[in-house]
Amino acid sequence: MPLVNMRDMLNHAYQHGYAVGGFDLVSLDFLEAIMAAAEAVQSPVILSLAESHFEYYDFELAMAASEAAAKRSTVPVAIHLDHGASFASAVRAINLGCNAVMVDASHEPFEGNVAATKKVVDMAHACGVPVEGELGYVAGVEGEDAEKHPGEVVYTSVEEAKAYVEQTNVDFLAVSVGTVHGRMRGEPQLDFERLKQINQSLKIPLVIHGGTGLSDEQFSKLIANGVTKINYYTALADAAGNRMRNNVDADARCGYTGIVKGIQDEIHNEVKRCMRNWGSAGKADEVMKHCEHWQPVHHVIIYNVKDTTEEQVKNIMARGEEILSQIPGVRRVITATAIRDDAKYKFSWLIEFVHAKVIDSYREHPDHVAFANDLFRPIAGDRISIDFAQSL
């Protein structure tokens, strides 16, 4: 399962002078085309799911498909929540399988951005999940994503960037140096000197939002100054849209499959072009060796009860499933009863954690402590608890 820690992936890119694409997907066509391109050129890849796109697809279903794609891939993959809207969004994304998150508080004043981001960082790091922050504001100009990012561009300052990283402990920083969401109008003017100073000050992987419309030379200069993750969507959407319009022009009566025919090829070719230009092509094996593989943990409890009816146990199990599944880093909670009456232990819990770090954060979480002390432990004195690492 080549789902890997995005912190390791981007640190490798930072140390070796290339960038990994964070390609936003909005359908299975996008997912399949992005993964096929990564396989074709043997590149690490970030599957990016932006909350601003959730109106176009079911996030939970898209996460299941993205995880399935990662599991069968031969190249290293990270799954990233992009432009999350809230702390709750980050918790939900982690519990559904994202192994990197970004909650966008860049529209807030500096103090508000720091406070919102630090809250996410503290929670996510306790789950082993790295966090991308954003300082400055990358506005939208025109195209599909422009209306999601209204307002004027606010450039990232070196001084605030240093303070922001120190106060939040983010793993990566998205900076504003002149790019825009959507399509560029005219020739983009990027502030490379500002970016150079930010990179020299922070020395952590930097992120560019709004990669569409930049020249190969501009991308090279961004990467030379610390950019290791490039968010990319509009050009993929435009390539797909152009192919669909051409299909309709060729056959005005074509149905759905006729309209979308060939759009994966267009997306695939654009993603490959980016991977080659940004230097990630051919790096898959090297990155795989460098990265921690994302390995879920199964927290297993088998137990017997005393002075309690089976109906009461079932009610406690149901309450536990409801409470414990909301704790950050908990993928799922499964309760069960032994099939055989002569089994040594009658009942069980299987709680899946996203990462080994959740063992400690879960144990100390107030919701778990309250449930365990008030409802579970008083009836389950005879119990065994073991943590298992899921085999890769």
Image: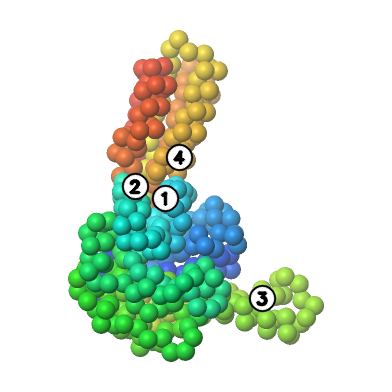
Kindly report which numbered mark, 1 or 3, lies closer to the viewer in this rendering: 1
Q: Which residue is mark 2?
A: 123
Q: Which residue is mark 1?
A: 87
How many residues crowd around disc 3 within 10 Å: few (fewer than 14), some, or many (20 or more)? few
Query: At label 1, which amino acid type do we have?
Result: Phe
Front residue (pair 199, 302)? 199
Relative placement, left or right, of 358 versus 254 is left
- Image x and y of residue 184, in percent: 48, 83
Kindly report which numbered mark, 4 or 1, lies closer to the viewer in this rendering: 1
Kindly report which numbered mark, 3 or 4, lies closer to the viewer in this rendering: 4
Return the disc, 1 or 3, that comes first in the chain's sequence: 1
Return the disc, 3 or 4, that comes first in the chain's sequence: 3
Query: At label 2, which amino acid type do we have?
Result: Met
Query: At label 3, which amino acid type do we have?
Result: Lys
- Disc 3 is placed on an element classified as loop
* CA distance separating discs 1 and 2: 9 Å
Q: Which residue is mark 3?
A: 261
Q: Are marks 4 and 1 in contact (CB under 8 Å)?
A: no
Q: Is residue 57 visible?
A: yes
- Image x and y of residue 70, in percent: 46, 60
Q: Which residue is mark 4?
A: 326
* CA distance separating discs 3 and 2: 43 Å
Give the color scheme: rainbow, by chain, secondary structure or one colour: rainbow
- Image x and y of residue 72, in percent: 47, 60
* CA distance separating discs 4 and 1: 13 Å
Return the disc, 1 or 2, that comes first in the chain's sequence: 1
Q: Is residue 61 above or below residue 359?
A: below
Return the disc, 3 or 2, that comes first in the chain's sequence: 2
* CA distance separating discs 3 and 4: 41 Å
